[in-house]
Image (cartoon, rainbow, N blue to C red):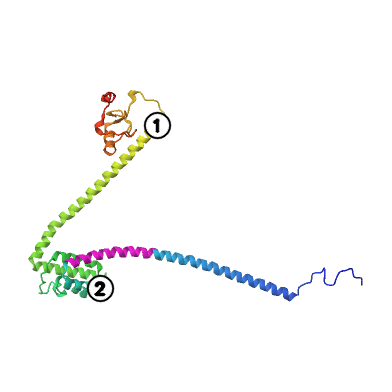
Amino acid sequence: MTNFGIQPGLGRKRKKPERDMIDEMLAEEENEDLSNQKRAKTEEGSDRLIENTKRREMKEQNSGKEKVQNTEISRKTGKLIVKVYEVLDKNSFDHFRKVMKKVNKKVYTHADSIINDILIAFFNSSIGVADLNSEISPVEVPLYLDRKDLSTQLAMYMPRDIRPKYKEMLSNFYTKYESHHKNARSAVKRQAKTKPKEIKNKIDEIAKRRADIKKMKKKEEIDKMMMRKIAENTEDSKGDEPEPENDIFCMVCYKNDNLYVAKCGHYACKVCWDSWLERYLECPKCRNRTRKNQIVPQSQEDVFKK
């Protein structure tokens, strides 16, 4: 057989065995499955990360609101405790602090226990005195009105299910106390007379403040409106020829009656001059220094020409 210079095995591509091709296809499929699994895990992880981030943000927002609320509550509580400290003696105040600790830790399970401890701290009395049918007389204490007010305010710190009975028993105690002690009864009557006046004075003061604020806002609006009109008038008059004397008008409201002239030669009606010069000691148009005693009626404008 003639050899044309082609070596055996060269110039012809050798076919891969069929088993090798199957193994390669299986390996490719396996790699593709692995990459798909990785991609799915990555997407799942990113979704979980986004969800966790949202939860964290929501938690931070809620915790921020709770902090603000807790701060407000702690301020109110702090003010109340200071007032109680000023009214009660040392032993009574120490007893009051123990009561409030028990309230915060939710130690009390019955209203009677809380009411009894509060009456001991504020009035040196027990819950038996609060019973209107009881013959036990309450002990007289100093600063009764202050003690009454503070013990009433404490209702807001009591558990919800205890509050109604707490208020009822305290009301019974106040009634009994005031019926037994003339000084307390007189003090309550005086308070009933003076309190409406104090409330009325506060309401009047608030109403006056609101009226002042409205006046200030209205004045600011008028000033802004005048400034806009002056600015528009100035822009419109730029490049215009001097107007005839009989066409003179107010540079603010454009009226031509009751006109006054300033030393700078600009005109405005008396109302606009007065309103403007109350706030600004200058001409609205040219900004030259101007006062109320430096404006004269239009008929006397020759004064400035002398």
Q: Which residue is mark 1?
A: 236
At horizontal 27% and vertical 72% (from top left) the residue drawn is: 104
Task: Tell me: residue 52, above or below residue 269.
Answer: below
Q: Which residue is mark 2?
A: 101
First in residue order: circle 1 vs circle 2: 2
- Report crowding for label 1: few under 14, some 14 to 19, many 20 or more residues within 10 A (C-alpha): few
C-alpha distance separating marks 1 and 2: 75 Å
Q: Is residue 199 magenta?
A: no
Callout 2 amino acid: Lys
Q: Which residues are magenta?
A: 61-86
Which residue is at the front of the view, 26 or 295?
295
Residue 76 shown left or right of residue 23 in the figure = left
Which residue is at the front of the view, 74 or 5?
5
- Report crowding for label 2: few under 14, some 14 to 19, many 20 or more residues within 10 A (C-alpha): few
Which residue is at the front of the view, 236 or 26?
236
Callout 1 amino acid: Asp
Residue at the far left: name it.
182
Q: Residue 269 at x, y = what percent?
A: 28, 31
Residue 6 shown left or right of residue 156 in the figure = right
Quadrant in the rendering for residue 278: top left
Q: Would you say residue 153 is visible in this rendering? A: no
